[in-house]
Image: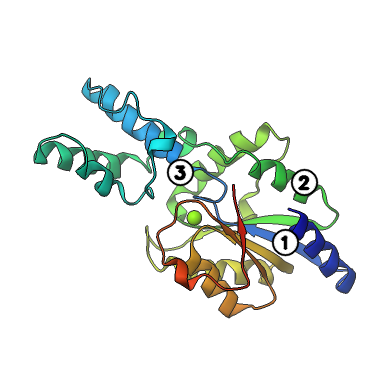
Amino acid sequence: MEQLTNHIHHIRQQHSDDHLMVVFDIDGTILDMRYMVQNVLRAFDQEHHTRLFHQLTVDDITFHENQLEFFIKSLALEAWEKEHLQNWYLANRWTSRFVQSGHRAFPRILESIRWLKQQPDVEVGLNTGRPEHIREDTLKCLNALAADYDFSFSNDLLHMNPGDWEEQVVYHKVAGINYFQRKGYRVVTFIDNEPANLAAVAEYDASILLLHADTLYESDNRTLPQHSIRVRL
Ligand SMILES: [Mg+2]
């Protein structure tokens, strides 16, 4: 936070009239995805009258939300049960029910966003690989969380993937930065948990301060730009 504050003050001195923007990824950066996984698995139990996950804590969830199959392997279940669980998880996790209310934010991140939005001529943009068709649910979820901090996220400052899930996410992350720049913002900082996204943005615009949300991620951390700063959430 201190480095981010110093960076914003430094840029402000150089570009006093610019509209500055800090861009945040959502999943694994603002939202702690372990809660979504926990909620979906508990809902599985409820719906199936099972008790497979009643003792599952978020600390037990040490895998990325796209990699449940590795966790399922360790469960004492028949092959068909494992397959059913995996399919149920995939079919449910991004439905309105869980997108709107199954999520929690990392403890200090919303406080930081509120602080940024209070700074003169600084805005916060959201840049996510989530597809457009869950835009409304995404905003509902984030704004319910942000309401506790007395701010809201706006629809026009949310850039989403125009394609489907996992389609050219890295490409669309760069497109997201470009989208905000075309709206007239000087993007000063980008924070994301995926090293590959940070690497692509570093290549696109070397002037942007890159923060790596060191949570659970899928891409190769050897691609992490050397000048990115690690953030523990
Ligand atoms: Mg992410």
Mark 1 Cα-neighbour bin, 10 Å: few <14, some 14–19, many ≥20: many
Amino acid type at image mark 3: Met
Q: Which residue is drawn at 74% across and 59% down?
A: 4
Q: Quick one: 72 or 122, which is closer to the camera? A: 72
- Identify the disc placed on residue 115: 2
Contact check, label 2 and label 3, Cβ < 8 Å: no
Residue 96 visible in rendering: no
**Along the horizontal axis of the image, is 145 left or right of 9?**
left
Q: Residue at x 67, y 33 (%)?
A: 147
Q: Compared to 229, does 45 lie above or below?
A: above
User: Closer to the N terminus: mark 2 or mark 3?
Assistant: 3
Amino acid type of the residue that numbered disc 2 sits on in the rendered structure: Trp
Q: Is residue 50 above or below residue 70?
A: above
Residue drawn 66% across and 42% down? Answer: 110
Describe residue 179's horizontal placement relative to residue 1 as left or right: left
Label 3 element class: helix
- The disc placed on residue 33 is 3
- Which one is nearer the viewer's eye here, 3 or 50? 3
Q: Mark 1 points at which residue?
A: 21
Q: Give the SS element for disc 2.
A: helix
Q: Earlier in the sequence, mark 1 or mark 2?
A: 1
